[in-house]
Amino acid sequence: MTTVAALEEGTDSPYALSHLDALESEAVHIFREVAGEFERPVILFSGGKDSIVMLHLALKAFAPAAIPFSLLHVDTGHNFPEVIEYRDRTVDKHGLRLHVASVQDYIDRGVLKERPDGTRNPLQTLPLTEKIQSEKFDAVFGGGRRDEEKARAKERVFSLRDEFSQWDPRRQRPELWNLYNGRHAPGEHVRVFPLSNWTELDVWQYIDREDIELPQIYFAHEREVFKRSGMWLTAGEWGGPKDGETVEKRLVRYRTVGDMSCTGAVDSDAVTLDQVITEIAASRLTERGATRADDKLSEAAMEDRKREGYF
Amino acid sequence: MSTTTTEELSATTLLRFATAGSVDDGKSTLVGRLLHDSKSVLADQLEAVERASASRGQDAPDLALLTDGLRAEREQGITIDVAYRYFATPRRRFILADTPGHVQYTRNMVTGASTAELTVILVDARNGVVEQTRRHAAIAALLRVPHVVLAVNKMDLVDYQESVFAAIAEEFTAYALELGVPEITAIPISALAGDNVVDPSANMDWYGGPTFLEHLETVPVSHDLSHCHARLPVQYVIRPQTAEHRDYRGYAGQIAAGSFRVGESVTVLPSGRTSTISGIDLLGEPVDIAWTTQSVTLLLEDDIDISRGDLIVPTKDAPATTQDIEATVCHVADAPLTVGHRVLLKHGTRTVKAIVKDIPSRLTLDDLSLHPHPGQLVANDIGRVKVRTAEPLPVDSYADSRRTGSFILIDPSDGTTLTAGMVGESFASPEPVKDEAEDDGWDF
């Protein structure tokens, strides 16, 4: 049983919520709003830490009932095996339904072409948006956080997308109080970001507090990697290493989970959550700056991809 | 690196605040310094700014590029929309709604201030209180932001004179108190030189108050719940219908105000049915008491008809329901709001049909004068509106409850958010509205 919380510094009330409680409560409110207002919501689930936290919050929001949403994974075909294993185990454990939009299928059918640089991140947009249309999803939860990137700092919690899934930053609905507006025309959908106000550190602290299991690649482990554009990439069938790039075994971990071709590992000996949190709190690099090649393509790379329908 | 980091960082509260300031008041510099000095600007972000600045032929890194995230903003060198920024100190986490200062972006300041517990109004020490300062104070008062900070910036350009600061602080405080701003803290700073932003200034020995950051870290973040009316808008009915929880029927929502206890008598509005709280689940855990802004699930002793959109309140403290709402509004859409407009009104978790019956006045923010019967409100206008709803709603006065006293109007044809509304009397309507013959250009 909860008793009144200890009086915290900077408050005049014993009823002030800790920052994690406040963020959790807000995210749960967002999940319940969507459940109350939409017909076919879906949670984008990659097996990465943000989507894992989203799923955990959704489970709490509807407890003791089941989550009234299915999951959707945009599978680039260049996944870390540990992550796919985690994804399937989680889906089974909670009795959820998983939809998969496969980039490889699109390449095999000749609809999408492999890029010269081998990255498949930009290729995810078409399979994602077509899946949203074909399944008639009207609300799509994403784990995007405003602290990740300057274009995302401008993103709404409820973000209306047209029938082409496009984001127009100049035509966003103002978001007032916690009165989210989910109105949309048939064919349009709303991207929903329950973790908008969380930072990378908040996510890790919450994972620690709630004792949430993560794929092992988030913790330091020995891995065969090679250096490209200043990042440690995992060798694999996706197309690395190339000539002049040499593989070496290093103690690394991942800060984000994405396509293997553009998600870099960082040197680390952090094997526990406490150590990871300490490492992140001291890091002088952002999560994306440290580990994502696709955001370095241009100054507005994220904004441009988001406009097209990327999450 | 100490291993107690996790615990230290967890024991913090969250402060949401918004900034407002005119174009050249140094808002970007202040935000930049806060982020920089709280070590929230990381090496790769700074590097990206340096690279972009150099490619434009600028000598020094342009810190505005840290905050101006959109292509159009960078091209035009202006901020066109609210951006949210995050930083932390060991004492507190901060969510900053960074809002543009132009008059035509009043709606963005309203957006930022609607969730803020504190608003920072920046003035240039050389110019003192100007029209834009009064506008920002008026909006902070309208939105009932609990704390207002007047940051008197560019003190370095007035030789750090106490008399300059004192005169501005006095003028602003008198004006803001008249508007009903509950608490004002004036701080003399130089965002560029760093005086009193994070570190106390050696140039202003005469100032004995907190630095800007210190004030942000220590300002109280919540109110005394004993003065709040408890309110729970029902978002969703949780019915697991499993063998283990066959009879579970919970009413889920985020407590908008006040607190609820097990055993308390409650009334469900608009139906008026009553019951007693038999249990409270705080995200899966049973608790005795829950309070604002916790997301909870209430269980009731009686099996009564409750659905999304209902409001659960203590029986001893139930608001009246009404179909006629009078409110101060800020129009946020490009298309105007006119008398006779058929709209949707979202209040709490309930969305109902409504019609705009009258627009008695439009407020001129410059001098807080009222223009009677403007006929319509256009983007960024603030005015008084009378709305008739198709169903009775349990609204509170915005002065009593920011959450259950607020609503939005939505265009039913395309879903556009039209208008932000605050129920009840406004500070800006002390005098009866009078028709003026010379008031041309506003009657349609």
Image: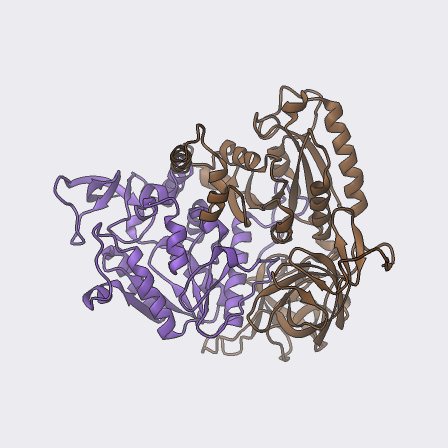
Comparing B345 with B361, the one in front is B361
Instruction: Please give left or right for residue A116 compared with residue B346 in the image.
Output: left
Residue B389 appears at what percent x and percent y? Answer: 71, 74
Task: Classify B72 as above or below B433.
Answer: above
- The quadrant of the image that shows the N terminus of chain B is top left
Q: Colour of chain B?
A: brown
Query: Is residue A270 found left or right of B224 in the rendered image?
Result: left
> What colour scheme governs how the chains and residues are painted in the rendered image of this protein?
by chain
Residue occupying the point 34% across, 55% down: A48
The percent position of residue A179, horizontal first and vertical second, equals 60, 62
Q: Colour of chain A?
A: purple
**Relative side of B70 to A96, left or right:** right
- The residue positioned 47% from the left and 75% from the top of the image is A186
Q: Is residue B143 left or right of residue B28?
A: right
Q: Which residue of the protein is positioned furthest toward the left in this rendering?
A: A243
Up/down of B75 relative to B114, above or below: above
Residue B72 seen in this snapshot: yes
Report the front residue among B438 and B343: B438
Locate the C terminus of chain B and report the quarter of the image it occupies. bottom right
How many numbered tags mark residues here? 0
Q: Residue at x 56, y 65 (%)?
A: A181
For residue B287, what is the image quadrant?
bottom right
Q: Which one is in front, A193 or A2? A: A193
Looking at the rendering, which quadrant does residue B219 occupy? top right
Q: Position of residue A8 (x, y in %)?
A: 61, 43
Locate residue A45, reporting x and y percent. Answer: 36, 61
